[in-house]
Amino acid sequence: MERGSFQAYVVSLERIMQNTYFDLREAMDQFRELCLMISEERIVPMEIITDIRQIYKQIQDQLTKVMGVKQLLEGKYRQYYHRDSRRDRDITEFAFWAKSLYSKFEYTLQEIEAKRKLKDSAEYFKAYRERMPFPWFQSKGNQITLLRNLRNLSELDYKTLSDLECEQKREVIWNGMRSVSLFVLSGEVTLIDSLQSRMQLREHDITERYKEDEFRGALTHLREISPSEVERVVRRFMDSSEFLKLKCLLLRIQSQKDLKKEIVGSTENILGVMGAGEVKTLSI
């Protein structure tokens, strides 16, 4: 390629570089303006977020293009190229500010999203607590199971395995009122440990180590059962003399509405005044 041809090619490259620089400067002005609209205190329309990301991609493409032309001019065609130091400085600053503004933009979006989730979560749990009767269990899963059992009390059915390993249903007596007996056993930690390890439950019964010295549960009855029968069931769990030191509190409930009654939420106070080995059944 002759000298004149080299110079003409360099001129065309410089024109490309200059035009791209102008496009880049215009895009940067628009990019800055949009980024200033992003704030944690403002509701950000999705259209603006989309525009910012598209313009940032456009800026990166323009930077790649202009830097490629600049590298070519400063390398192979160095002797024909006259550097524009101001333009070079602007391009360097554009690259820095584009990256900085975009990083801040994405960080702000993350903060907005985190606050939104926190707000939604707080509102959910507030609404959940307002709907939820007294939480007999600390475990959310256990509490939900208890509520479901109470809601479907008339539909529950136990299944057991016979000695022949064939599935059969436990006999269900449909007459009379079904119910759930809530119980609390409180006492020495070692006694609660021992009791928890030996207690065997049926399909729909629930237990929970509520505290180190407190064990809670819910026994589901498929037939009408008297308070004295429930006491005998619980005492079978405590068939050793060592368990006579434990306090036992019983409440029979038949619906989710019973959980809202004041006496259910007063169990801690009642336990506090009971003596060791005492068994008390509360009427709902």
Image (cartoon, rainbow, N blue to C red):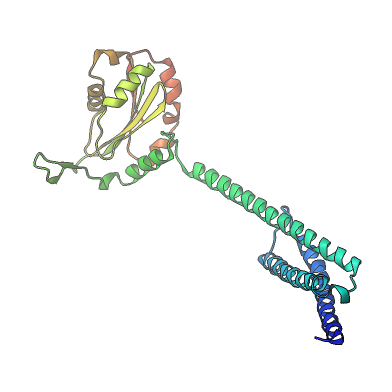
Q: Residue at x 41, y 36 (%)?
A: 259
Q: Residue at x 32, y 43 (%)?
A: 149
Residue 29 horizontal/vertical position (percent): 82, 67
Which quarter shows the C terminus? top left
Figure check: 224 above or below 214: below
Looking at the image, the residue that sits furthest to the left is: 164
Residue 64 horizontal/vertical position (percent): 73, 69
Figure check: 258 above or below 55: above
Q: Is residue 42 visible?
A: no
Q: Is residue 78 visible?
A: yes
Which quarter shows the N terminus? bottom right
Residue 45 horizontal/vertical position (percent): 68, 64
Q: Total label count?
A: 0
Query: In the figure, is residue 154 to the left or right of 110?
Result: left
Depth check: 220 or 252 in front?
A: 220
Query: In the figure, is residue 171 to the left or right of 76?
Result: left
| The quarter of the displayed image where residue 153 is located | top left
